[in-house]
Image: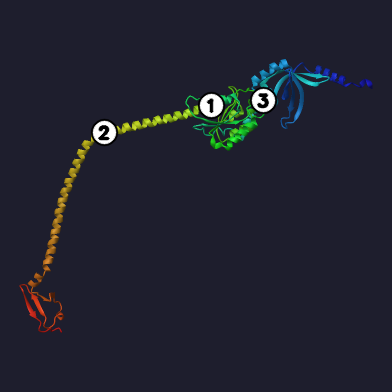
Amino acid sequence: MNEDILSLYELNALVRRGIEQAMPDACWIQAELSDVRQNANGHCYLEFVQKDERSGQMVAKARGMIWNQVFLMLKPYFEETTGQAFSNGLKVLVQVTVQFHELYGYSLTVTDIDPAYTIGDMAKRRREIILQLEEDGILTMNKELPTPVLPQRIAVISSATAAGYEDFSHQLANNPYGFAFYTELFPAFMQGNQVEQSVLSALDKIHQRMAEFDVVVIIRGGGATSELASFDSYLLAAACAQFDLPVLVGIGHERDETVLDTVAHVSVKTPTAAAEWLIGRIYESAAHLNYLSNRIKEGVLQRVNNESSRLKLWQTRLPSMVVRRLSNEKRTLMMLENRLGQAVKARIMRETHRLDLMKQRIEDASPEKLLARGYSITLKDGKAVKDSRDVKEGDELITYVLKGSFASKVIKNKDK
């Protein structure tokens, strides 16, 4: 029975020989990087993990390492090709050899890497985020905002010490047209694990003072392209897509585009390009105003010329028009004068006839006419006697007849 008992070392040696016999010299594996660290000697120690796609639970793990000479070549090659830092969370396709050491156990030694796999995984992740934004109906919301005519009040999200921020500010301050800009920096991390949270915090602060700004500018500069993965964030992209001010992004380089670039109102490659876009927008507005000003001047000048021509035409036509108008008015006046004379004559004739009738009536009603008919007028105390009862015996009366008058005295009033 004692012959069947193995020491731990003997068991591990058997396992090592079994693995060496069963495994090829090298093989390619897909895995996610975890706990990546480099020691003082330049060797890279890490763990390879695999997670269940649905639950996210870890289903496999293996210790790995990359010798310093290999790591010095693979790391810059991978980062330049993918634009990503060789860091935790990346999915990679690596060539490994399998070792089993009696003391240190099972491990994988990396001998090569295929960046194309990681690029594909990154692109897949971006596509998934963009698809989710589209399904949520917010992908193009910021792009659909009206572009400010004069974007002069600018909220800047960047690192205060970033060279890109200095380039941006210098470009605005020294624009060749002398345009004035007001900028306020809302500091945020532009690299590392804190990018998402710090940029979201800066957006919240800007939102509280939104009426003070025309546009938000997110810029970074001087950092490695491998740090752009921080901007492939659903939360950050959703916040920018739904922001109520246009968001201008200048965080990448010529061949890089993040999800944040996709949702931004305007995306440019560098902070300097962001400043040039703002200057260009003001210039376009100024040029349009200058165009309108020239149009107004031309329109006024054309109107003045047209009115001057009309005035000259009227000056030429006016004398003949005055003569013609005077002739017409004179003819009209003569007609009116003739008609007035006829009307006056007719009126005079009518009034003369009316006066004759009135005269005849007056004459017919005059005392002389009455007296000529044999009537007389008797006066008592200068008043005509109309009623015999108004006189009494002894009253002296004067009677007028057609020819002359005579006095009489009442002897007896028969009506009393």
Q: Position of residue 374 (x, y in %)?
A: 8, 74
Q: Position of residue 53 (x, y in %)?
A: 71, 30
**Image quadrant where one finds the C terminus:** bottom left
Q: Nearer the viewer, residue 236 or 351?
A: 236
Tell me the element at label 1.
helix
Report whether 4 appears left or right of 115.
Answer: right
Report whether 102 appears left or right of 289.
Answer: right
Q: Is residue 62 visible?
A: yes
Q: Residues within 10 Å of mark 3 (few under 14, many from 20)?
A: some
Residue that mark 3 sits on:
121
Residue that mark 1 sits on:
275
Report whether 37 appears left or right of 372.
Answer: right
Separation of marks 3 and 2 at Cα, in angstroms: 81 Å
Amino acid type at circle 2 is: Leu
Amino acid type at circle 1 is: Ala
**Label located before the other in sequence (2 or 1):** 1
Q: Residues within 10 Å of mark 1 (few under 14, many from 20)?
A: many
